[in-house]
Image (tube, coloured by chain):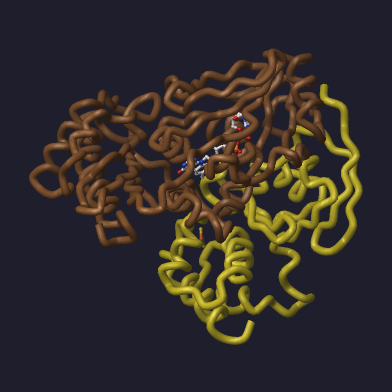
Chain colours: A yellow, B brown
Amino acid sequence: MSARAALSLQVNGAAVDRDVEPRLTLADFLRNELKLTGTHLGCEHGVCGACTVLVDGEAVRSCLLFAVQAQGRSITTVEGLAQGADLHPLQRALLERNGLQCGFCTPGVLMTAMEFLENTSVPTREEIRKALSGTICRCTGYQGMVDAIAEIAGGDR
Amino acid sequence: MKPAPFRYFAPTSLDECVGLLDEHGDEAKLLAGGQSLVPMMNFRLAKPAVLIDLNGVAELAYVEETSSGGMRIGALTRQRALERDPELRRRNPLLAEAIPYIGHFQIRNRGTVGGSIAHADPAAELPAVLCALDGSIRVRGGGGERTIAAVDFFQTYFTADLGPDEVVTEIVLPQWHSGDGWAVQELSRRYGDFALVGVVCRLRVDAEGNVTDGAAALFGVGGAPVVPEAVAQLVGTRAEEPTLAAVSAAVAAELDPESDVHASASYRRHLARVLTRRALSEAYARTNGGTG
Ligand SMILES: Cc1cc2nc3c(=O)[nH]c(=O)nc-3n(C[C@@H](O)[C@H](O)[C@H](O)COP(=O)(O)OP(=O)(O)OC[C@H]3O[C@@H](n4cnc5c(N)ncnc54)[C@H](O)[C@@H]3O)c2cc1C
Ligand code: FES
Ligand code: FES
């Protein structure tokens, strides 16, 4: 068996210290060890995007990163977006514009859009579509998501 | 937990990394961006007993100019770092244009140049860019350093001229000639997917607009990128019809693609012809800053 390794990182602003097996993915660490089950696992090979989280502000697949590789990093998951009962503006826009139905893809869509909006000041709908290409949604047909992101990008964020 | 257990090492220097590879040899795998290796580990298609994480080897992440005006790009350089490099379009517009075709931005945030090269996926963009541009790959192992021309490095499906004790340290690209035209053309089923077939190319013209030299590489048409000889038939022409059509057909005739679940061999050959024609025409239009 592989020896456990000490792991210290920030998750949604809070310091976390654990011992983990090296083979534990960041996604499983968040879900099973920290009970942050907002990060979803669909495919576990990088294709669906449901597991996307921010690592030091960058959107990455948490199914393709080992938890030990997040040593010293700052992780933001979907649970880190709302302030108490107040939804993040992007979450509210997604809700109001019917950008989600079953919600399985939603955490990945949100975390993807967070980095995208950080880097793109006034995106075109085409750019938004491209940014969303790495998150697969079985329900919505994406239009509501594009509307929500365009609204947030264009108006006050 | 899905991947099989492994011993994990996180070296912080290349020397340490080479030492670990030497010690653990066949049992060990290098981990770079993890965008190809970890999917295989999650499905237990890969079960390395030892995982050597390159991500702490900061000396392998760099973009530098060579003494002859070319580029050296360290293996650990993220694909996303290149995409964001404001200088890249000037230094090598073909590379700059090819990078965003690799998966999605979330994948490029982690995926590395060296990982893409070492993985040698037959449908990957970077190996083809290196082959079209006469690039080379530098590797280091217990036996020292080697430099391998890209066209020799990629051998067949997921197989490169790379020993189990060797690390890809950098890729080297010759200087980009500023008047050269370039193009990337590929077809994938969905935006961001691996290409069914793709073409990258570069063309140079003289003051009269006649092609003096050029090269292309096709990917997704066999086990390794193919650098077709027929592109040389454009030399002395203005890359017009019917020459373009004839050259593209000759390029397609050089290929021996296979059928798989994604596409039949004949469809791939058809795509290769159509995409080559588009790529050469686009590259020609971009020569001498679009005046060619
Ligand atoms: C959804 C998705 C879509 C993708 N689409 C594309 C695409 O369209 N085009 C494309 O080209 N790629 C695509 N990829 C793969 C690409 O993102 C990877 O970057 C690349 O194949 C591997 O790079 P990596 O750094 O992630 O390497 P890893 O996955 O860490 O490693 C891959 C292999 O290379 C070896 N290795 C890594 N670095 C070195 C080194 N320095 N020296 C020696 N060996 C090394 C590893 O041991 C392993 O065997 C996609 C991936 C995903 C998940
Ligand atoms: S679960 Fe990570 S991308 Fe699908
Ligand atoms: S809302 Fe159901 S998968 Fe996107």
Q: Quadrant of residue A116?
A: bottom right
Q: Is residue A86 above or below residue B224?
A: below
Residue beneath the point at 28% across and 26% down: B257
Q: Is residue B138 above or below residue A54?
A: above
Residue beneath the point at 74% across and 33% down: B53
Q: Is residue B189 above or below residue B143?
A: below
The x and y percentages for residue B263 are: 28, 34
Q: Residue furthest front?
A: B207
- The quadrant the C terminus of chain B occupies is bottom left
Q: Quadrant of residue B39?
A: top right
Whether residue B10 appears in this view of the structure is no
Q: Residue furthest left?
A: B242
Q: Nearer the viewer, residue B60 or A153?
A: B60
* Left or right relative to B104: residue B245: left
- The quadrant the N terminus of chain B occupies is top right
Residue beneath the point at 51% across and 21% down: B160
The x and y percentages for residue B172 are: 54, 36
| Label tally | 0
Q: Nearer the viewer, residue A42 or A152?
A: A152
* Left or right relative to A54: residue B219: left
Q: Quadrant of residue B64?
A: top right
The x and y percentages for residue B72 are: 59, 40
Residue beneath the point at 51% across and 66% down: A101
